[in-house]
Amino acid sequence: MVRRLSHAVPGLLTLVVAGAGLTGCGWFRAGDVSHVKPSGFVLRGYVSVAGAPTGRSGTPCDVPATGIGANAPVRVTDPTDRTLLGTGVLGAGVLAADGNAYRCNFGFEIAGVAGGRDRYAISAAGRPAVLFEATELRQDKPAVIRVD
């Protein structure tokens, strides 16, 4: 009897080690995990403020009189502004030529914006929200909020 048990021990030991390894990598209980992909997406855009000082495009800029600047809050909601779907902050301003004038552009990127909407309302620095079509935003077209 002892002899038979000694032959079974290596096989049993292999099974226990393999089971522990598979448990650690998530193979066991994998059926308990949702197979639905998350509906969130990365929303990119910028706030473009008119009246920036003359300079070289791509250099830092600031337009303090507008109340818009780096680290100002950005909110993404449903079109009725009742459901908050994402938040972020504006990045530093970058000068951009606009015909004969200049604009100061403040970029933002918000990860994990909840999907399932046809349109999104985006507001920056407490200003009124601007509506954007969801299809364009999900195709990585930037949401541009113009402040003139």
Image (cartoon, helix red, strand yellow):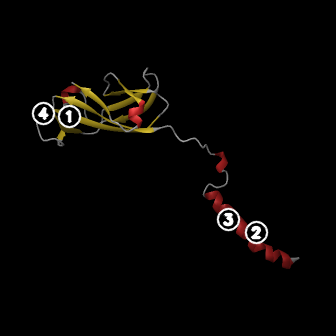
- Between disc 2 and disc 3, whose residue precedes? 2
Q: Locate residue 130 relative to residue 24 in the image: left or right.
A: left
Marks 3/4: CA distance? 67 Å
Give the secondary structure at mark 2: helix
Instruction: Residue at 64% x, 60% y: name it.
Output: 22
- Total labels drawn: 4
- Between disc 1 and disc 3, whose residue precedes? 3
Q: Locate residue 104 relative to residue 75 in the image: left or right.
A: left
Instruction: Residue at 77% x, 73% y: name it.
Output: 9
Name the residue carrying label 1: 104
**Residue located farthest toward the top when viewing the structure as drawn:** 80
Residue 58 lies, with reference to residue 104, above or below; the image says: below
Give the secondary structure at mark 1: strand
Q: Are marks 1 and 2 in contact (CB under 8 Å)?
A: no
Q: What's the amino acid at mark 1?
A: Cys
- Quadrant (top left/top right/bottom left/bottom right) for the N terminus: bottom right
Name the residue carrying label 3: 18
Q: Which mark is residue 12?
A: 2
Q: Nearer the viewer, mark 1 or mark 2?
A: 1
Residue 62's x, y, as percent?
A: 19, 35
Instruction: Residue at 35% x, 31% y: name it.
Output: 74
Residue 95's x, y, as percent?
A: 18, 38
- Between disc 4 and disc 1, whose residue precedes? 4
Marks 1/3: CA distance? 59 Å
Give the secondary structure at mark 3: helix
Instruction: Residue at 47% x, 28% y: name it.
Output: 117
Marks 1/2: CA distance? 69 Å
Residue 44's x, y, as percent?
A: 35, 38
Marks 4/1: CA distance? 8 Å
Residue 98's x, y, as percent?
A: 17, 33
Name the residue carrying label 4: 53
Residue 17 picture quarter: bottom right
